[in-house]
Amino acid sequence: MQRKRIENIPETITREISEKIIRNELKPGERIYEAKIAEELGVSRSPVREALRILEKNRLVELIPRKGARVAEISSAHIEWFYDVFEALYGLAARKVTEKAGEQDRADLGAALEKIEAAASAKDVEKYYEGIFEFAAIGMRAAANPLLAQILMDLWPSNRRIQYATISRRKDTLEENAGFFRKIYELLDSPDEVEAEAAVRAYARNEKQVALEMIYGKKRENDRDGNTKS
C-alpha cells in the first residue's frame, strides 16, 4: 500500500499543477520552482521533477536548461495546430460513434447533453465546462477504438486549457455554443455518418476562431513558429 502511494506522487503533482495552469491560477510565463512545490507538498524534488517532465510533454510547461520550469504560453500557432488535429480526430470519433454506439452510450450522451444545455441556460461556466468534457469522454468510449481514445487523451490537457480560457470569457454565448452539441447528438442517429463528422468539424473550426479572437484579438499575433510579434 505504501509503495502504491509513493508511485502515485508524480501523478498527483501533475494533476494539481495541471489544474492550476488550466484555470490560470498559474499564469503563462510564470516560473515554477521545484523546491517550493516539494516543500508545499512535503515530498522530495524527484517526483516534482518527474511531474514537470510530464507537464512538458502535455505542453503545459516549458523546461529551460539551467533556468528551470515555467508555464507555457498559449501561442496562436499552438491553437491552430491543436484545432487542426482536433478537427480530424474528433471528426473520426464522431463517425465511429455513429457506427458503433449502443443504446446505453446514446443515453449517456443524452444525459451529458442535458447537463450542457442546463448549464448554458443558467450561464454556469463551470458546469458547462464539466459537461462538454463529460460528453467528449462518453463519445471516446462509444467510438470503441482504444488507440483513437489514447491519442485523444494525449490532447486532453491542451484541450481543457484552451477550452477553459475561452469558455470562461463567453458566459453570454454558451447557449449558442451548446447548439453544436445538440446538432452533433441528433446526427448520431443519422444513417450517414459523414453528417456527424461534418458537425464536429464545424464545431472545431468555430472553436479555433473563437480561441484566436478571445485570447489574442487584434492586439497580438504569433508567427508559425510561435514567436510573439507586436
Image: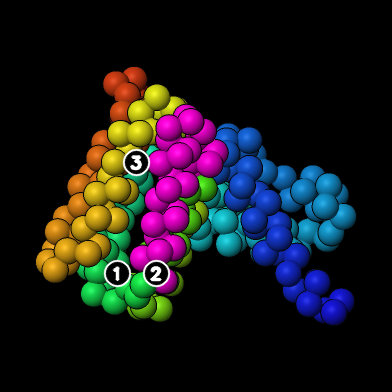
The answer to whether residue 170 is visible is yes
Left or right of 137? Residue 9 is right
Whether 210 is drawn above or below 69: the answer is above
The N terminus - image quarter? bottom right
Whether the magenta-drawn stretch holds residue 119 is answered as: yes
Q: Circle 1 sits in a helix, a strand or a loop, which is it?
A: helix
Q: Could you give the CA–CA distance between mark 1 and mark 2, rounded to whole angstroms?
A: 9 Å
Residue at the location (48% across, 31% down)? 122
The answer to whether residue 224 is visible is no
The residue indicated by pointer 3 is 178
Q: Position of residue 207 (x, y in %)?
A: 30, 41
The residue indicated by pointer 2 is 105
The residue indicated by pointer 1 is 97
Q: Position of residue 218 (x, y in %)?
A: 29, 21
Which image quadrant for residue 137? bottom left
Q: Circle 3 sits in a helix, a strand or a loop, which is it?
A: helix
